[in-house]
Image (spheres, rainbow, N blue to C red):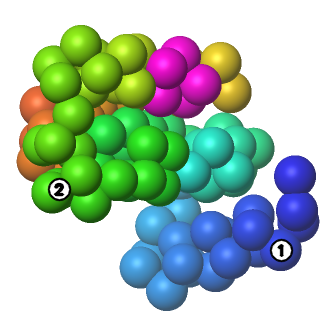
Amino acid sequence: MDSRLIARLIKNMLKLGVSDVKAVVKVDDTLNGIEEGLNAGGWTVGIAVTGNEIGLDLHDWQALTLDQQQNLRQQAYQRFYHVGAHFVIDSVADLPTIIEEIEQ
């Protein structure tokens, strides 16, 4: 893992006044971003459908069949979980439920 990425995360934590990395939730749409959060010791949430991992805009996503969408979704989820993501969601719209779960 690139130490510059971890340094950037820590710099952002300091700017926000966060002293405990376990209070950080790294939400990212790339596998490298998830690894960054894991290496820093925080929680990680992968964004599978609406981000870079699938890489389609809304129009192209909607042009796919439901089977194609499900296949791409499953592949993206597997890749995120394979690198160690704590959670994987379709989009940031699903994030509040995950934050509630982490807080408990």
| 58 relative to 33 in the view: left or right | left
Q: Is mark 2 on a helix, strand or loop?
A: helix
Marks 1, 2: nearer the viewer: 2
Using the rendered image of the protein, determine whether residue 23 is visible from the camera's viewpoint: no
Which residue is more in the foreground, 42 or 73?
73
User: Measuring 63% from the left and 43% from the top, which residue is drawn there?
Assistant: 31
Where are the magenta residues, as a range? 75-80
In the rendering, at what x and y percent does residue 56 appear?
A: 34, 53
Badge 2 density bin: few <14, some 14–19, many ≥20, Cα 10 Å: few
Whichever of labels 1 and 2 marks the residue nearer the N terminus, that label is 1
Q: Does the magenta stretch include residue 66?
A: no
Q: What residue type is labelled 2?
A: Leu
Q: Distance between the residues labelled 1 and 2?
A: 32 Å
| 64 relative to 6 in the view: left or right | left
Secondary structure mostly seen in the magenta stretch = helix
Q: Which residue is tagged 2?
A: 58
Q: Quadrant of residue 11?
A: bottom right
Which residue is more in the foreground, 100 or 68?
68
Badge 1 density bin: few <14, some 14–19, many ≥20, Cα 10 Å: few
Q: Is residue 70 above or below residue 49?
A: above
In the rendering, at what x and y percent does residue 37 appear?
A: 61, 48
Using the rendered image of the protein, determine whether residue 10 is visible from the camera's viewpoint: yes
| 56 relative to 67 in the view: left or right | right
In the rendering, at what x and y percent does residue 43 appear?
A: 48, 38
Q: Which mark is residue 18?
A: none
User: Measuring 53% from the left and 72% from the top, which residue is drawn there?
Assistant: 13
Q: Which residue is tagged 1?
A: 4
In the rendering, at what x and y percent does residue 99 appear?
A: 21, 38
Q: Is mark 1 on a helix, strand or loop?
A: helix
Q: What residue type is labelled 1?
A: Arg
